Image (cartoon, rainbow, N blue to C red):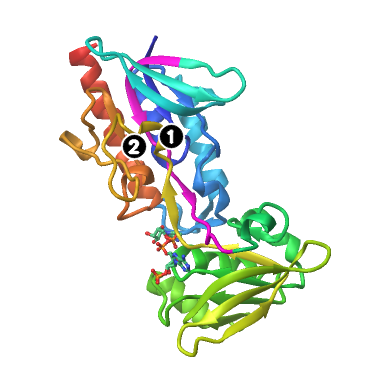
Amino acid sequence: MENIIILGTGCAGLTAAIYAARAGLRPLVLEGNLPGGQLTTTTEVENYPGYPEGIDGYTLTDNMRRQAARFGARYVSATASRLSVTPGSGVKQLHTAGADGACYETHALVIATGTTPRLLGIPGEREHFGGNGVSTCATCDGAFYEGMDVVVVGGGDSACEEALFLTRFASRVHLVHRRDTLRASEIMARRVRGHAGIATHWNHLPVEVRGDATGKVRALAAKNRTTGDVVEIPCKGLFVAIGHEPNTHAFEGVLDRDANGYLVPTGSGGVGTRVGGVFVAGNCADPVYQQAIAAAGMGCRAAIEAERWLRENA
Ligand code: NAP
């Protein structure tokens, strides 16, 4: 039986781990599918306070991980697949995915499971996903496209960040967006608009990823929403950056989720749930801000609330 389990090792989970560990609770942290979270797939983080020159995402989360470990946080490589709560005692069981299917029991729980990049759902995308030309992570796969044309789909901060990063390798980056204005923050949009290596294709909706006879990506077919014409944009790689979906299926039926699957925080600190002792933090419970520092702040609040709850209830 654990005092407190933390699900997730992004900014929210690791900040919760630092606070819970410093409170002497020896938190057990389940690392999840992507240890370090979304930031490990980012290059330069420019807006996390305290790093005037920026810091790469991997180093930032690795620092947090070591900081929590220093105060007694323990890590286990596991992903929660289902949550159940024993009526009466309020003990929480976390059933995990994987060969051993271990089940962990705890008094308090902080859920910081983050989000997963969304895919377009068009023909050819799944077939080429993961090493065959379609990716959601320029940091991971960008270097494979040295001297080649690539396409980035999306108009938000992620798409701009991916496009700018890919200019380091690609001969040309085509940014394909379904509208004629970027959703991204002004600083990112300005960098993209002013970059000679990025060609923008406004009002184009992707319809198919087309491959060649060897199974590699050859082009993205996209429909011009003004004329209705379908054009082919030749490319060797396609990077999809159209937003994210919250990793919350494991909590279906036990916790409140909104129409898009985000956990709905309630109660004091804005991190509680309808189950006593279960707290939420970070992008899985924040459809609005989705920022590393906002996730860290929520992780801090969740750990403090969990510590108070344990003192009064366990
Ligand atoms: P986002 O802001 O939701 O943008 C998603 C983009 O994809 C939008 O431009 C959207 O078009 C487009 N899109 C969605 N579904 C599509 C579809 N089926 N087909 C074609 N296009 C589609 O997502 P994000 O860029 O991942 O950003 C998420 C959050 O993280 C934001 O709050 C952002 O500020 C933050 N973030 C911040 C940074 C940073 O601070 N450096 C970096 C990355 C992300 P519409 O515009 O037409 O809706």
Q: Position of residue 49 (x, y in %)?
A: 39, 52
Q: Position of residue 46 (x, y in %)?
A: 46, 59
Q: Is residue 57 left or right of residue 265?
A: right
Q: CA distance from mark 2 to mark 1?
A: 8 Å
Task: Give the quarter of the image for residue 215.
Answer: bottom right
Residue drawn at (39%, 36%) of the image: 112
Classify mark 2: helix, strand or loop. helix
Instruction: Give yes or no for residue 119 being in the magenta stretch.
Output: yes
Task: Give the quarter of the image for residue 179.
Answer: bottom left
Magenta-drawn segment: 104-122
| Residue type (three-letter) at the residue carrying disc 1 | Leu
Q: Residues at badges 2 and 1 in contact (C-beta under 8 Å)? A: yes
In this view, the residue in front, 226 or 158, is 226
Give the numbered dot on residue 299: 2
Is residue 170 visible in the rendered structure shown here?
A: yes
Residue drawn at (79%, 69%) of the image: 212
Q: Sequence order check: which comes first, mark 2 or mark 1?
A: 1
In this view, the residue in front, 166 or 231, is 231
Q: Position of residue 180 (x, y in %)?
A: 42, 82
Q: Is residue 159 left or right of residue 237?
A: left
Give the numbered dot on residue 14: 1
Density class for disc 1 (Cα within 10 Å; few <14, some 14-19, many ≥20) is: many
